[in-house]
Image (cartoon, rainbow, N blue to C red):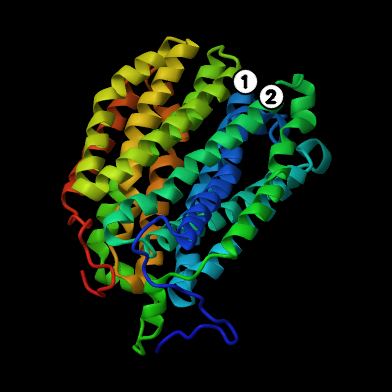
Amino acid sequence: MKSPTPAGQEISTEAISTSLNTTMMRRILASSFLGSMIEFYDFILFATASSIVFSQVFFVDLDPSLGLFLSFTILAVGYVARPLGGVVFGHFGDRIGRKGVLVMSMMIMGGTTVAIGLLPPTAVIGIAAPVLLTVFRVVQGIAVGGEWGGAMLIALEHAPKERRGFAASFANMGGPAGAILATIVMSVFTMLPDDQFIGWGWRIPFLLSAVLVLIGLVVRLKVHESPLFAKLEDKAEERKIPLLEVVTKYPKNLALGILAGMSSYTVQGLMTVWAVSYVIDDGLDSTHVLWVKALGAASTVIVVWFAARLSDRIGRRPIMIVGMLIGALVAFPVMLLLDLGMLWAFALALILTQGFVQGTIFGPFGAFCAELFPTRIRYTGSSLVYQTSSTLGAGFTPMIASALAAFAGGSLWLIAAVWIAVYLLAGLATLLVKEGRDADLESEMR
């Protein structure tokens, strides 16, 4: 049966825009960007803290290498929870609308991040500290799992057909922008004396999330519901559970989308988490490394902007495949740069990977995901593609890279070889997907 809008709730909509330069469309794009930025500010804070501080706060009695491994394990748990968030939030986003679900995901994410900032260390509450840290990380993962799909769709489903790729990219630009903000804020506090940073300084960036969430909610509450969803609500028809329809009617699109998306997130997990820890352990100053990490994220935003705009002209697949080919070509050179142990070499490696590789793939990826599925299951389907590829591509990469380096006796060649294999597989998957640039998203069949 049809899933009605909750009693007393009116869906405020407007027609699909003929331009991105209207008051409501600018507000929608800002909401998409800010929401994704805030969610990823929270999420990347955790990743950064996992690399430089959590082992000294929550695993202080363990061997440093083991403590770092456990920190990365909790980081991975959050990635595992993201597909669950995509399913849960996607279900309600496909049933009752995009807007309300997005407001809820932002509130949950912000609240959890503040809770992490207030969490006492193991020295105070014992084993409860890492246990609670894991719980908070799971909730974080669930919340961020519901954010990106909705933020991307609320922009794409309002946008004119010929600008869908660019509109969807605002959620993708918000992610690295959040990473920039998180990295800069955390790096400021790393300039404190070590005892003060470990004692309380690392907590302040987490607590600041509350301010960002309030700003994001003010913008998001003024946004109209998706016009495509509103049209779907007007049709009285029997509708299946979104997850079941995704996996039974669109398994090929789901699987190929995940494989394609893994390429972007493999480089993210490798270069923004594992490589950060690697070069700091090799002697680089942590504050300088974090500033360089922010530079890498800035290069991602710039390349996403251009790649998304270009995808509206020549298609999603050609742009993404170019990024994957670049990724395969630079794998060994990037490992050589990391082995130099120089800050400039690390900066060049990040610009190559985060900018030219991840940015080129990530720019069209929002529209690529959305165009795989019809409106009635688009939130669930696109969220599953994005979050599962993120989990598989980034969630376990730091642990796998650490294990591969240890297996190879400290050499990084094995990491590069696996990296190349991932990119070649992703390129093949992208070739097998039907180009969606000209798809009619108002149609219920692809």
* Crowding near the residue tagged with mark 1, few <14, some 14–19, many ≥20 C-alpha atoms within 10 Å: some
Helix, strand or loop for disc 1: helix
**In which quadrant of the rendered image does the C terminus lie?**
bottom left
Q: Name the spot of residue 288 as percent of width and height, x first.
A: 58, 18
Can residue 385 be seen in the rendering of this structure? yes
Distance Cα–Cα, label 1 vs label 2:
6 Å
Residues 151 and 91: in front is 151
Q: Which residue is mark 2?
A: 190
Which residue occupies 22% across, 32% down? 325
Helix, strand or loop for disc 2: helix
In the displayed structure image, the side of residue 298 where residue 186 appears, left or right: right
**In which quadrant of the rendered image does the N terminus lie?**
bottom left
Position of 434 relative to 349 (above/below):
below
Asked if the residue at tag 2 contacts the one at tag 1, i.e. Cβ–Cβ closer than 8 Å, the answer is yes
Q: Which residue is mark 1?
A: 287
Q: Name the spot of residue 27 as percent of width and height, x first.
A: 51, 58
